[in-house]
Image: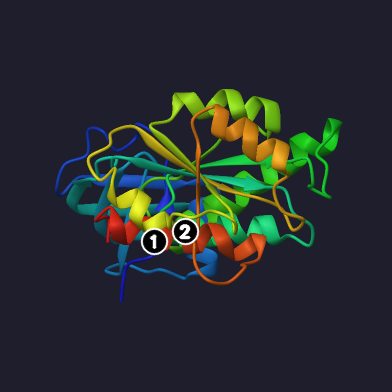
């Protein structure tokens, strides 16, 4: 069974060596001691959310502090190309289901997309709260799946802003039921690509023709995911499974 993971501040593991003692405090320590009830000798992983993992054992613990003895330090490099899920805002928390599953499956970044047909609208204070909720969901899924890197969540984009964002990527694919080429075959043609790949998923009502045209003009290609129409909550994770397999990440 894999060790439970606890987050520590970025940079705090940079100087750690085998046999070093690392102190964890605050909410993470309270969760380890009070909820997990970890005691001396049990295995734990400490991660800085930027790719550094310390594999160790509990040296001591009390209500406000967890002390871990490092056994092994692992630096997990960022993968290339980076896979970015562009997830349209969707009702019924389907968008949150999508980003949670995508995080567990290894997505490297997420872009919330306020599409023309999204029923959910992020405006004013709601936008800030919703973005914070997405980041919280992804952080929790990172810990649950024992990852050392937390995917970045960019600011929400409308369709015009997304069209401007597409040229900055190495490749972008609009998942669309009317596409002729499969996502698998098109990804196979860019195996050696550096940079990032955008996987664009629309809302329940689909992506409007004008949006598709604008994204294609910006350099995106349409791609068929499979023979069936998937929900907004499942299309992104399904696309990620395909990409992980074709690009050799799995």
Q: How is the image coloured?
A: rainbow
Residue 62 showing in the rendered view:
no
Looking at the picture, how far across and down is residue 159, in whole percent?
69, 32
Q: Residue furthest left?
A: 18
- Quarter holding the N terminus is bottom left
Residue that mark 2 sits on: 239
| SS class, disc 1 | helix
Residue that mark 1 sits on: 242
- Quarter holding the C terminus is bottom left
Report the side of 50 relative to 31 (left or right). left
Looking at the picture, how far across and down is residue 12, in whole percent?
34, 35
Looking at the picture, how far across and down is residue 123, in whole percent?
84, 34
Count of numbered badges drawn on the protein: 2
Residue positioned 28% across, 33% down in the render: 194
From what the image shows, is residue 187 above or below residue 144? above
Q: In this orientation, which residue lies closer to the viewer: 75 or 46?
A: 75
From what the image shows, is residue 189 above or below residue 155? below
Mark carried by residue 159? none
Looking at the picture, how far across and down is residue 75, in whole percent?
22, 43
Q: Marks 2 and 1, Cα distance to the nearest angstrom?
A: 5 Å
| SS class, disc 2 | helix
Residue positioned 29% across, 58% down in the render: 246
Q: Residues within 10 Å of mark 1 (few under 14, many from 20)?
A: some
Residue 172 showing in the rendered view:
yes
Q: In this orientation, which residue lies closer to the viewer: 138 or 209?
A: 209
Q: Residues within 10 Å of mark 2 (few under 14, many from 20)?
A: many
Report the side of 53 relative to 126 (left or right). left
Answer whether labels 2 and 1 touch (C-beta < 8 Å): yes
Report the side of 6 relative to 188 (left or right). right
Residue positioned 47% across, 58% down in the render: 239
Report the side of 186 relative to 111 (left or right). left
């Amino acid at each position: 069974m894999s060790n439970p993971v606890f987050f520590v501040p970025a940079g705090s593991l940079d100087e750690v060596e085998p046999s070093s003692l690392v102190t964890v405090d605050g909410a993470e320590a309270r969760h380890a001691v009070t909820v997990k009830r970890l005691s001396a000798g049990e295995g734990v992983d400490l991660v800085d959310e930027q790719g550094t993992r310390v594999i160790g054992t509990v040296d001591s613990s009390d209500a406000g502090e967890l002390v871990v003895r490092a056994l092994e330090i692992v630096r997990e490099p960022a993968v290339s190309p980076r896979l970015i899920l562009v997830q349209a805002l969707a009702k019924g928390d389907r968008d949150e289901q999508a980003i949670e599953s995508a995080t567990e499956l290894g997505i490297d970044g997420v872009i919330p997309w306020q599409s023309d047909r999204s029923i959910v609208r992020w405006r004013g204070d709601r936008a800030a709260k919703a973005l914070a909720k997405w980041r919280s969901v992804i952080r929790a899924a990172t810990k649950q799946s024992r990852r050392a890197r937390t995917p970045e969540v960019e600011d929400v984009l409308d369709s015009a802003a997304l069209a401007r964002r597409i040229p900055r990527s190495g490749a972008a694919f609009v998942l669309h039921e009317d596409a002729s080429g499969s996502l698998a075959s098109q990804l196979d043609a860019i195996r050696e690509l550096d940079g990032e790949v955008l996987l664009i998923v629309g809302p329940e009502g689909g992506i409007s023709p004008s949006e598709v045209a604008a994204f294609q003009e910006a350099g995106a290609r349409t791609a068929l995911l499979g023979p069936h129409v998937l929900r907004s909550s499942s299309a992104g994770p399904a696309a990620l499974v395909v990409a992980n397999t074709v690009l050799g990440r799995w």
